[in-house]
Image (cartoon, grey):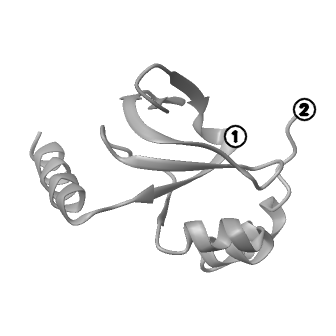
């Protein structure tokens, strides 16, 4: 049974990322500081840090391979791909310059379709 510890706080928070960072450990906070909290739009090759809603620990770090309605397929290493439920994690995205340009291009392409 998964319990979302921060739900009441995040429902009233203006900045969800700052609220999450306030409650996680210092090492996790340093890791997530420069990342973006994303809830809805994921693209292939985004680097994702998945923080468990029940434990507030980073469970999975990897690259998005598959985007479905309720789950993401994340490639952890060259041998392992993990499927996660989006609702069970706070998902942080790392954007490099190349990836952010590619991400903007994909957003524009999808909006034209």
Q: Residue at label 1?
A: 88
Which mark identifies residue 29? none
In the image, what residue occupies the spot 22% across and 53% down? Answer: 103
Q: In the image, residue 72 lies at what x, y percent?
A: 49, 31
Residue 38 visible to an observer of this rendering:
yes
In the image, what residue occupies the spot 65% across and 40% down? Answer: 87
In the rendered structure, the answer to whether residue 1 lies left or right of residue 31 reads: right
- Mark 2–mark 1 Cα distance, whole angstroms, equals 11 Å
Circle 2 SS class: loop
Q: In the image, residue 9 lies at what x, y percent?
A: 80, 71
- Depth order, front residue of 31/54: 31
| Residues marked 2 and 1 touching at CB (< 8 Å) | no
In the image, what residue occupies the spot 68% across and 65% down? Answer: 28
Vertical arrangement, residue 25 with respect to residue 42, above or below: below
The first of marks 2 and 1 along the sequence is 2
Vertical arrangement, residue 87 with respect to residue 97, above or below: above
Q: Residue at label 2?
A: 1
Vertical arrangement, residue 69 with respect to residue 26, above or below: above
Give the position of the C terminus as an image quadrant: top left
The image quarter containing residue 19 is: bottom right
């Amino acid at each position: 049974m998964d319990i979302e510890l921060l739900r009441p706080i995040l429902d009233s928070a203006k900045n969800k990322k700052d609220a999450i960072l306030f409650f996680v450990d210092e090492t996790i906070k340093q890791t997530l500081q420069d990342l973006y909290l994303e809830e809805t739009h994921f693209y292939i090759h985004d680097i994702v840090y998945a923080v468990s809603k029940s434990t507030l620990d980073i469970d999975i770090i990897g690259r998005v391979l598959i985007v479905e309605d309720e789950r993401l397929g994340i490639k952890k290493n060259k041998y392992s791909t993990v499927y996660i439920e989006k609702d069970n994690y706070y998902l942080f995205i790392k954007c490099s310059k190349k990836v952010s340009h590619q991400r903007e291009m994909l957003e524009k392409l999808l909006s034209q379709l």
